[in-house]
Image (tube, helix red, strand yellow):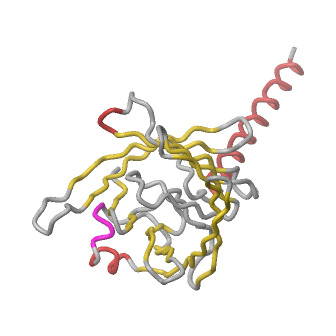
Amino acid sequence: MVKEKKNRLIRRGAICIAAIALAALAGECPASPYRPAAAVSILSEYPGCEARARHRTQVWKVVPEGAPDGATLLRFFLEASSEAAAVCELRLPPPGSAGEIRWEGMGRSGQKKSGTGLLLAPGFPAPCDVLPVGPGEGGGSREYGERIEAGGRVFSRKYRVSFHPVTVGEARAMGWIRAEEPDSAGLIMVTATDEKARPVVKQLWPADGSWWLYEETPLRRSWLYR
């Protein structure tokens, strides 16, 4: 009886130690870009058609869901009607894998896929562009290609993606962050331009975050809302 009780105590102790070790490992795992642990809300601002027209705003809700194969599904909803169908969906491969990113706009918006880590949906109202954000990016630029299939033909485009460290003071002065002090080891502005060096999209990322703080395209500006 005494021996059995002692064995039970040893097993319980081993379980507790294992749980503590797993918790410590989970705390050390870096966040994966575009893979938030819970839903996020985004405030987007769209300029009016005329100089004096008021800016239109929209709050988006991005709901993550894990797939059985380790992929992440991101569904974008109008927050005011989150029970309705999503306006678009992103499927991201498991972190560290070489799988494709797939985007689908509901209705007649079409589909896109990319194996480079860059997927752009120019003109689409929801802030669903994906840039090749990765750990350790601190400066420099790289060129990325995009292949689009339409009408049985394949079209190729090239983009340059640059990475620039940004201070919190600079971000505040530019209006890129509105919330409290970011809990981050640093900020990085990731910018994509086309072959004529025209801006396509830029996103301000916390260096250790799972979602951007600010995004800007020629048609909208967006902030992480809460």
- The magenta-colored residue range is 175-179
Looking at the image, residue 31 lies above or below residue 73: below
Number of marks present in the image shown: 0
Nearer to us in this view, 185 or 199: 199
Looking at the image, residue 36 lies above or below residue 205: above
Task: Name the image quarter holding residue 143.
Answer: bottom right
The residue at 52%/69% (across/down) is 207
Residue 86 coordinates in the image, percent (x, y): 45, 36
The residue at 37%/47% (across/down) is 41
Residue 147 coordinates in the image, percent (x, y): 65, 64
The residue at 40%/62% (across/down) is 213
For the N terminus, which image quadrant? top right
Residue 171 coordinates in the image, percent (x, y): 34, 75
What is the residue that sits farthest to the left in this orientation? 52
Task: Name the image quarter holding residue 142.
Answer: bottom right
Residue 117 coordinates in the image, percent (x, y): 64, 63
Q: Is 153 in the magenta? A: no
Left or right of 57 in this view: 118: right
Left or right of 82 in this view: 72: right
Looking at the image, residue 62 lies above or below residue 56: above
Instruction: Identify the main secondary structure in magenta.
Output: loop
Nearer to us in this view, 171 or 75: 75
